[in-house]
Image (tube, rainbow, N blue to C red):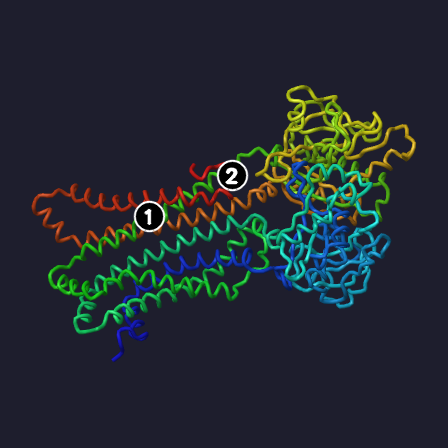
Amino acid sequence: MSHPAAPTHILRRLLRAPSFTLLAIATLALAIGADVAIFSLVNTILLRPLPYPEPERLVGLFHTAPGLELDELPQSPGSYARYAGSATTLESVAAWSGREITLTGEGEPERLPAAAVTASFFDLLRVPPERGRSLHVEEQLPGAAPVAIISHRLWESRFGSDPGVVGRSLQFDSESREVIGVMPAGFAYPTPETEAWIQMEVDPAVAPLGMFSMHGLGRLRADVDLATAQAELNQLLGDLPTTFAGDPAAPVLANAGFKAVVRDLRDEVVGDIAPALWILLGAVGLIFLIGCANVANLFLVRADGRRHEIAVRAALGETRGRLIASLLIESTALGLAGGVAGLGLAVLGVELVSKLGATALPRLHERSVDGHVLVFTLAVSILAGLLLGLPPALRALPRQTSIDLVEAGTRSTGGRTHHRTLRILVGAQVALATVLLVGSGLASRSFHRLSQVDPGFDPEGLLTFHLSLPDRDYAGAREVADFERTLAERLRVLPGVASAGGATWLPLSGFGSGTGHALEDFPREPEEVPPVFMTERVTPGFFETLGIPLLAGRDFTTDEHVQGRRVVIVSETIAQKFWGRHDVVGKRIAPGGLPSDADDWYTIVGVTGPVRDENLHDPPRDTVYYPLLLASEAAPREGWSSDPYEDSAPPRQMAFAVRAVAGDPGALAGAVRSVVTELDRNLPLANLELMTVKMSRAKARLAFSMVLLSIAAGAALVLGCVGLYGVVSYAMRQRIPELAVRMALGARPRDIRSMVLADGLLVGAAGIAAGLAGSALLTRLMKAVLYQVSPFD
């Protein structure tokens, strides 16, 4: 005869109660699965090292300039050359810059995400190409033959895994580049979408300090920490005017408190998503506890039916240890079964969460069920088994079982201790559900606030795209200018198009470029730190197309480009900051240092409303809009070209927006493609999408947190209500004899109903009160993911 604690005996006991067993396993599977799914994301994004050899030694190199109100500046050619040539705490230094390039010549033209990298880039990461070779140092010097390394994905999709692609010349931006290597599958730096890497041209002899256009990487030497490396880099910067003698940016940056910053590269890759993920893990942890409490209630009710059996076994001499072991082994078996089912649900859940957070979460391409996830699943499964088996196990104490033996023979209702335990468990469920409901409400309020933010433009009815003009096909500034102007004009006359315009970048793109400015009304000394404004080049009609209001003055005109008139439009934030409510039209500013000639000033001809061009969370930035085409004076000056386009250097990479008269702007995509193809059949469009899609991406992180917290709160509410209902209904069934006596003595049905409702409301109210108190403490942790909402809202 098998022992009651033997696995076969426990299995038979569970199979004799299939409804209880299936309900318990299903509840645990949901609770454990949610926990494992979110932990899997936390493990992938926050805990797992970067997929490179010795990743703990990889760092990101940045700068700060408090005097310019710039918390973070990337690398410049000057700082990179200084660190690469002199740093001893860094084993290697590299830099990269993101861009898009056009691949032509084989099949349809294709716009590819790419990166320009220094020769040390792959060696620093210690990931050599799978085929071919890496970059050589001499290939980053001016005049070197153009080369490229392509991704494994591009090698397979575009070239059919042809090994002969290495050594072949391909046309990138109409420039012939020899393919020298193919990266391994899965290599995803700087982004998972990067398809090609080309050499970055860096001449140490002519490396400006003030052009911050590169992302810096470093690999620490063994036994060197972040603080030591940062201290050395700041020492290398030294006295900027002396270290970078002759560089006009050096004295300005020195006065601005320019310093180096060294950060763990994993922190840089992950960004600021960590608080949201930890909060979500805590939320599903509460779901886990609620699920365990629900199953523990079921166990208590089931154990109550087995009181007589347990009491008899104790009376016959079975030790307390064996009684407790029998119950805990049974509960642990349920926990493990729930864990196995939960792991399967977690795999599906991770895929669902990955789709919900595709634009909000980094490193999703690295997700997998690894050893850490399996160990976590085993741990929470065992913990669940112990938590749900502990309350009935405590009732197996000898004194309690003797009481149960007497009670079992005298009455059918459970003892007061039993009912009190059930009420405590249900009250805890309600409390935990309340905390989650408050957290979900805060996230929903934040998302609503973010949705109500005025971005400064009208995203409805806008179709946007990017293009880049290759140097080979558009050699001079005149060709670039003619194409961009012609394209804008052709787009405006398309049927169904209300207006069209272009700019160096569109709002919410995350890009930007700024420079110091001189203001004629506010003179300063040459070494004094100038105000830094973002700068953008725009076509006439850009503000009308985007729906950016002109608060004063006028828009640019086409003829101003060829007449060489120096005019700008400024954002309202600049006007208010420097001139208050005074009319600023006619005031003059100049980019860079103080103008040496009175004719170098730019006249303000308009003031626009503020635009949130970086994201929806941060306030609008001070922005100066320049005409797309800048020219010298119509009458050439000494040292200037006679061609007014020659000195304008119009941007080759442009973003365009087309506003539809009515209906779906996506319907204009075909016509837009046709216009571009007619002008240049080898020129592909990139990022052809609706502006409303960009808006959705800007809200993605908060929306992701809100949706998951809302799902967690809904599940907690349902579980809490089910637990409360089950306990109250069970307690009332146990009190049927008592209620019958009350009614026989004259109690009315209304009185009985009031008593039953009061019993449930008392437990619920106590749980809500405890939950609100807990919320006041725990929701402070949400401050990092809330937007314009107090944790005590």
Say whether residue 79 is visible: yes
Q: Earlier in the sequence, mark 1 or mark 2?
A: 1
Between 33 and 481, the residue placed more toward the observer is 33
Mark 1 residue crowding within 10 angstroms, few (<14) / some (14–19) / many (20+): many
Residue 670 position within the rendered picture, expressed as x and y whole percent measured from the top left: 69, 44
Residue 340 position within the rendered picture, expressed as x and y whole percent measured from the top left: 42, 66
Rendered view: 344 above or below 591: below
Q: Secondary structure at mark 1?
A: helix
Give the quarter of the image for residue 285. bottom left
Q: Which residue is mark 2?
A: 787
Cα gap from disc 1 to disc 2, whole angstroms: 27 Å
Assign the C terminus to one quadrant of the image. Answer: top left
The image's mark for residue 38 is none
Which residue sits furthest left? Answer: 745
Q: Amino acid at mark 1?
A: Val
Between 160 and 419, the residue placed more toward the observer is 419
Q: Residue at 64% of width from left, 62% of height from top?
A: 52
Give the quarter of the image for residue 557. top right
Q: Secondary structure at mark 2?
A: loop
Q: Which residue is mark 1?
A: 430
